Image (cartoon, rainbow, N blue to C red):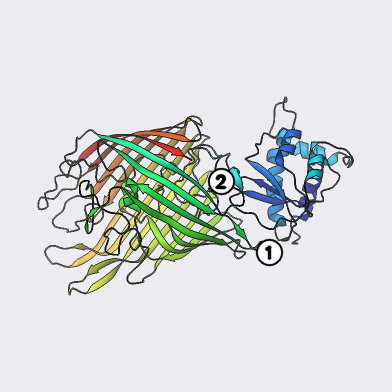
Amino acid sequence: MRQHGVGNLAKLRRLCCHILGVAALKTDINLTIGSKSVIVTSDKIGIDIPAVSAHFPIGLTKSETTIWVYEERDRRMSKTLARTLGSFLLGAFAFSAVNADEPVTPEAPAQLIDQRLAEPPINPDKEDSVTTAFAEKPAGPLKFHFGNKAEAESAEKPAAFYHLGNKATEESAEKPAAFYHLGEPVKKAGKGGKGRGNKWFDYNGMVNFGYTFSFNSPLSSSNLPVGFNDQADEFQMNQLYLIFDSKEWVSDNEKWTMTGRLDLLYGTDHFYTTARGLETRLDGSPHWNSVDPANIKRLNATGAAPYYGLAMPQAYVDLETPFMNDMNLRMGHFYSPLGTESVIAKENFFYSHTYNRIYSKPFTHTGLLASTSILNEGLQVSAGFTRGWDNFEDADEDLSVLAGISFEMEGHSFGLNLHSGDDHRYLDNSGVAQAGNVTVTTLQYSRQLGKKGTYILQGDLGYGEAMQTHDTTGTLSEARWYGITNYLIYDYNDEISSGLRVEWFRDQDNARVLGIAVDEEVNGGNYVDITAGLNLRPNDRWIVRSEVRWDWSDVTSDIYGVDGMFNGQTKRDQFTLTLDAIYSF
């Protein structure tokens, strides 16, 4: 065992002896608090936390803490053990073991530790609920932990635990309802299920449905270019979303861990998550889903697209390795880490999405992404390769680069992600097929405003080679797009939150939204949306959201008959009012 932290660990062991009511700890205890696990000593007996919480009123429920016991095999973690166990003892046992009728002061935990360490050893023959719990548990090493560490990490999460960006699913259930974890390079699979013990997989899901009222009475019954809730004055079942997490496989030496995840989405939102070579063919025509000729509401590059359909936006394996501070390798088909907003409805505050989310960056990747933490876990880095934008297969077999970096400090979070590769297919002036570079960079900043407020700032910058045509010369040149989005969220309590979103998006050459990048024929390129919303969470199952949104754009084109981007390209602005609900199961 490494020698750093040994003295502190010995003191913590003594403190455990006093708290648990035993003369000496002769067991290996794996304390699981949310997603953190700690080995205390060495042997092989286990206890359940209800015995401890009954003996000491620490205010923890069974779903939040469980104690397993197993034979310790890896002794490389003394520093982490001392730090994590110390935090647990200070924040849970020591803090709450103070007389509940007395006011608690910030000095109470430290005073209690000094007091307990000064007390004489407890009589090992004394029987109480804790020592009885030790005696009743069977001995034996526990080499494997299957599944998702039960309900502690998923089922008891607040209903509106928002995923803005690349957030970890392993945050503890004690997080505030609108706690935003920004910049996590990879969120591991195997952490989001219903906790079904040793079964091969766990599952959870949700259904999202809503209605968007347009004050414009659109000529085309469409809210475009607003996406996802793109139909005006019409009910949409946006998502029936299912998540299947595999059990957790752990190697015999407990150094390698593997989990898997599969996501299925059925509804009107499937259109935005399709990947070429999977839900659609390489030319963009439908593959899995068929088009209803009597209900054509969307178009893609090949013509009519399905309205309701099935998509598989994620199917991947996570492999946690013993190298480079437990580096994680994600392999398969997964959501892009670029950006703040998620496809999964319950991970967003607002029902609608920004232009930056819909038009400036990919939704999914297929490839490999490695992520790890450095500098005492203060800095997260990720790097890998993909098959490009929303591709499951790539006819040219070109690989793109995906990389990110993020860190947190004292209530502030920073994240920077980049994707770059030859992802634009076009014909040059000689009619020869070419592949042009497309690079997108996303910068995110988040700050906690007191205990109830959260501010998020996101900036996006995109570049596409040979995406713009010059009408007078017929030559091709690069196109650019960029934007800034502000989010302000305030939690009044666990049931009610309000939010404001202000976005400016600049499609400089009109290659992304209008899709007509002809410099002399289209004017403008600015898009603005201002959205105010309210979230109600009556219980852990339901979220009810409402928002009012105003959109404006200065894009026009006399030749192409575009008088504005709204109401069938006849108006320059649009007001919408939405109401939607999310039910989680």
Does 495 sit left or right of 94 as displayed? left
Report the front residue among 336 and 297: 297
- Residue found at x 76% / y 34%: 55
Which three-letter amino acid code belongs to the residue tagged 2? Glu
Residue annotated with mark 1: 253
Circle 2 sits in a helix, a strand or a loop, which is it?
loop
Residue 336 seen anywhere in this rendered image of the structure: no
Relative image position of residue 333 (x, y in whole percent): 43, 60
Residue at the top extreme, as displayed: 101
> Which of these two is toward me, 471 or 216?
216
What is the C-alpha distance between the residues marked 2 and 1? Answer: 26 Å
**In this view of the protein, can residue 445 be seen by the observer?**
yes
Q: Given the image, on which type of amino acid does mark 1 rest?
A: Asn
**Mark 2 packing: few (<14 Cα in 10 Å), some, or many (20+)?**
many
Q: State the residue in front, 410 or 544.
A: 544
Which of discs 2 and 1 lies nearer the camera? The answer is 1
Q: Nearer the viewer, residue 505 or 175?
A: 175
Q: Which residue appears farthest toward the left when viewing the image?
A: 559
Residue 484: x and y in percent read 35, 47
Query: Split into 4 quadrants, where in the image is the N terminus?
Result: bottom right
The part of the image, by quadrant, that contains residue 122 is top right
Q: Is residue 132 above or below residue 382?
A: above
Q: Is residue 65 left or right of residue 568?
A: right
Q: Pinpoint residue 39: horizontal percent, then vertical percent.
A: 72, 52
Which class describes the residues within 10 Å of circle 1: few (<14), some (14-19), or many (20+)?
Answer: few
What label sits on residue 12 in the rendered view?
none
Q: Is residue 313 left or right of residue 324?
A: left
N-terminal of the two: label 2 or label 1? 2
Relative to 52, is 265 above or below? Answer: below
Q: Secondary structure at mark 1?
A: loop
**Residue behind mark 2:** 171
